[in-house]
Every structure is written in C-alpha cells, then in structure tokens.
Amino acid sequence: MALLDIKKAGAPVLKEICAPVDKIDAKLKRLMDDMAETMYEANGVGLAAPQVGIPIRLMVIDTGEGLFEFINPTIVKKEGSEIDTEGCLSVPQIFGEVERAAQVTVEFQNRRGKMQRITAQGLFARCIQHELDHLDGRLFIDIAKSIRRGDNE
C-alpha cells in the first residue's frame, strides 16, 4: 500500500463531476486500499477519489465502525435535517456549520461488485453526504452556513 497526495481546495479535480466506475479490478482495489491507508494516516474519517486526484465515483469511510468502501454510491432516501460542524482533509484548518439530512439510505457496489444498500444516521450519514459532495465537485465550504479557522483537532 502507498500513501497518496491529498489535493487541496483550488485543485481543479475537486470541482469535477466524477465519472462512474465501470470496472472493478485489481488496480481499483489497490486504489481503495491506498485511499484507506491515506485517510487513516491523515486522521480523517472519509476520503473520496477526487481528493487524491482521480475523478471517479469512489469513496472510503470509517467513522469508528470499520471501513466502508463505496463504489458508484447514490443516495436513494433522505430524512430529517441537522446542522453540525464539518472539516475536510482537502480544506485544512477550516471548519463550517453544514446542514445535512439526519438519515440517508445509500446504494453502492462493494469491492466484489455486489450491490449494497445501507441506512445511516449521525456522523456516518454526514460523512456519506460530505464524500458524495466531493464526487459531484462540491466542497463543504461551498454550502456551509458559516466558516471559521481552527485547529485540525
């Protein structure tokens, strides 16, 4: 596995609408492994492929319940609303108050290509929405109700 370079706000790839993944092969699986290693090393809870310079619909998340890999994720249902603070590995030292759905149901493929459907709430739901925004060329600072500078802790 290898650590990847995390692109920072201003990098053109972070504004791209990402292409669907059409083939799950050894190269894609290696990328998912490298993305997870990079996310953990940076003390993040989520990382989307465009954040490492690859504009495809792929993201990894671990909010403390184990690693989830999402290939071609789509939110099929949203419920409720809540506002909370978000940060991003691509926007270091910046935090913002962002309104998100309180609960989401998402469909995606796993690394074996099998379709999955999960319902998430709390931090996991927020992470899914945050990373999906990356796949659509949006950063949290584009939709934050307020923004502040601060420590990354």
Image (cartoon, helix red, strand yellow):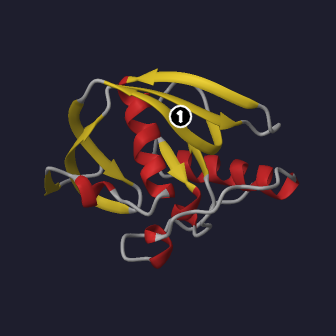
Question: Which residue: 20% across, 50% down?
Answer: 96
> Does residue 113 lie above or below 37 as drawn?
above
> Does residue 66 lie above or below 94 as drawn?
above
The picture quadrant where one finds residue 115 is top right
Question: Which residue: 28% across, 24% down?
Answer: 80
On the image, the x and y values in percent for residue 100 come to 29, 37
Which residue corresponds to mark 1? Answer: 62
Q: How many marks?
A: 1
Image quarter of the N terminus: bottom right
The picture quadrant where one finds residue 82 is top left
Q: Which residue lies furthest to the front in this view?
A: 76
Question: Which residue: 45% across, 68% down?
Answer: 14
On the image, the x and y values in percent for residue 69 come to 65, 39
> Does residue 65 lie above or below 85 as drawn?
above
Q: Residues within 10 Å of mark 1 (few under 14, many from 20)?
A: some
On the image, the x and y values in percent for residue 35 come to 63, 53
Amino acid type, residue under disc 1 in the picture: Asp
Left or right: residue 108 compared with residue 137: right
Helix, strand or loop at label 1? It is loop
> Does residue 123 lie above or below 95 as drawn?
above
The picture quadrant where one finds residue 18 is bottom right
Left or right: residue 72 compared with residue 135: right
Image quarter of the C terminus: top left
Of 141 and 62, the residue lying toward us: 141
On the image, the x and y values in percent for residue 148 come to 14, 55
- Is residue 78 among what the camera can see? yes
- Is residue 153 among what the camera can see? no
